[in-house]
């Protein structure tokens, strides 16, 4: 086929700018794979693209993760085959909200032999891979250490609590924005779940993960124990940046680090791919629980509204060509 259906961002703005359109089918280049997309994950990152807060050319097809089947292999690709079921990160150049997407072969995880439905598999690449890399590669978590996670019931928060457990954490505590989300977060591996406004009394932690920003950024720093590490994974609040005083870090023996999966995947695709395959295997074994809800591709704007409103728990995926 020459053309395909895709959700495009023709101009920056609210959810209503998202357009279901006909676009050209991409072809894989050297070292790339083309995938017939079954499902595409819906993420806060795609909202940033839509709002113009990330530098992308227009019109732009968003979508940082997919599941589906290999459609074609570019020159030099080995170890994958046409028709093979896969999960993949499409985070470097986007394009996942479409019937066909291309990505680096390193960022593709075969699903052969894994008891993982394609809908669930589309919810794994971004959040679960980030959780493992942020805690293992960046925080360098040690067995028995305590971990505190903001937005524990969300797509990323739901994976961070479980990944912390798999990596040997001791006490794992999360925050949620409303009482209705407390039990949902508990099911994702948290020992304790507190409301966001009560987090200051939770104690001190070896690792604090913040993807909310704003007031949560300063609170995160205050929650660090001596030799504690704070990992910044986002700014979902949209608040102005919070400065981190270097002298305070020095005097209190604290560390602040950032992790961005898109930048990491572009710079180190082989390592990102290994983390992706680790996450897929953990989800297939049942060691990582993924709570997933699906909507048709044409309802991408509704998915964005739900994510922006904070009403979601777990992960939303878009049905592109379910099979």
Image (spheres, rainbow, N blue to C red):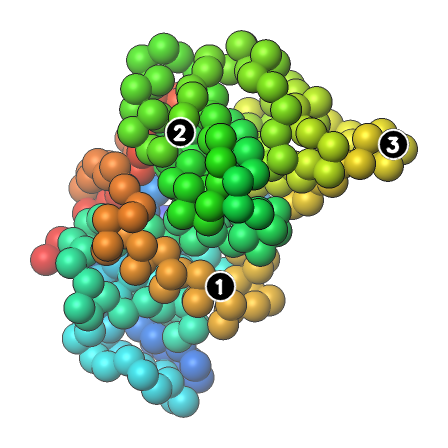
Sequence-wise, which precedes: disc 2 or disc 1? Answer: 2
Instruction: In the rendered view, tell whether residue 187 sits above or below residue 201.
Output: below
Disc 2: which residue: 190
Q: Could you say which quadrant of the image residue 285 lies in?
A: bottom left
Mark 2 Cα-neighbour bin, 10 Å: few <14, some 14–19, many ≥20: many
Instruction: In the rendered view, tell whether residue 169 sits above or below residue 75.
Output: above
Which residue occupies 19% across, 63% down? 114
**Disc 2 to disc 3, C-alpha distance:** 31 Å
Q: Could you say which quadrant of the image residue 43 lies in?
A: top left
Disc 1: which residue: 272
Q: In this view, does 306 lie to the left or right of 114?
A: right
Q: Find numbered disc 2 in the image and state the secondary structure of the residue it sits on.
A: loop
Mark 3 Cα-neighbour bin, 10 Å: few <14, some 14–19, many ≥20: few
Disc 3: which residue: 251
Question: Where does the N terminus fall, quadrant-wise?
Answer: bottom left
Instruction: In the rendered view, tell whether residue 191 sits above or below residue 117.
Output: above
Instruction: In the rendered view, tell whether residue 30 sits above or below residue 212.
Output: below
Disc 2 versus disc 1: nearer the observer: 2
Q: Where is residue 131 in the image (x, y as percent from the top left)?
A: 46, 46
Which residue occupies 39% across, 12% down? 178
Q: Position of residue 102 (x, y in %)?
A: 36, 69
């Amino acid at each position: 086929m020459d053309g395909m259906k895709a959700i495009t961002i023709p101009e920056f703005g609210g959810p209503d700018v998202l357009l279901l359109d006909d676009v050209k089918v991409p072809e894989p280049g050297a070292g790339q794979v083309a995938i017939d997309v079954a499902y595409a994950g819906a993420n806060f990152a795609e909202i940033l693209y839509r709002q113009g807060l990330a530098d992308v050319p227009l019109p732009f097809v968003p979508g940082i993760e997919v599941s589906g089947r290999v459609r074609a292999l570019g020159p030099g690709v080995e170890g994958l085959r046409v028709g093979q079921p896969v999960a993949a990160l499409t985070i470097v150049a986007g394009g996942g909200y479409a019937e066909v997407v291309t990505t680096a072969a390193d960022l593709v995880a075969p699903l052969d032999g894994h008891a993982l439905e394609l809908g669930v598999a589309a919810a794994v690449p971004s959040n679960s891979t980030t959780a493992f890399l942020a805690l293992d590669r960046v925080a360098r978590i040690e067995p028995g250490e305590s971990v505190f996670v903001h937005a524990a019931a969300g797509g990323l928060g739901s994976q961070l609590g479980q990944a912390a457990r798999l990596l040997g954490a001791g006490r794992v505590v999360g925050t949620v924005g409303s009482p209705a989300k407390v039990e949902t977060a508990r099911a994702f591996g948290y020992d304790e779940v507190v409301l966001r406004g009560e987090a200051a009394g939770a104690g001190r932690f070896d690792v604090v993960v913040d993807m909310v920003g704003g007031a949560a950024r300063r609170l995160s720093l205050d929650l660090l124990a001596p030799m504690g590490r704070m990992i910044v994974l986002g700014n979902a609040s949209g608040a102005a940046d919070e400065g981190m005083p270097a002298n305070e870090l020095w005097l209190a023996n604290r560390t602040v680090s950032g992790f961005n999966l898109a930048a990491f995947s572009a710079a180190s695709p082989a390592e990102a791919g290994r983390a992706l395959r680790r996450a897929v295997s953990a989800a297939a074994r049942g060691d990582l629980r993924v709570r997933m809800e699906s909507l048709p591709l044409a309802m991408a704007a509704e998915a964005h509204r739900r994510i922006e409103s904070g009403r979601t728990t777990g992960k939303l995926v878009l049905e592109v060509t379910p099979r």
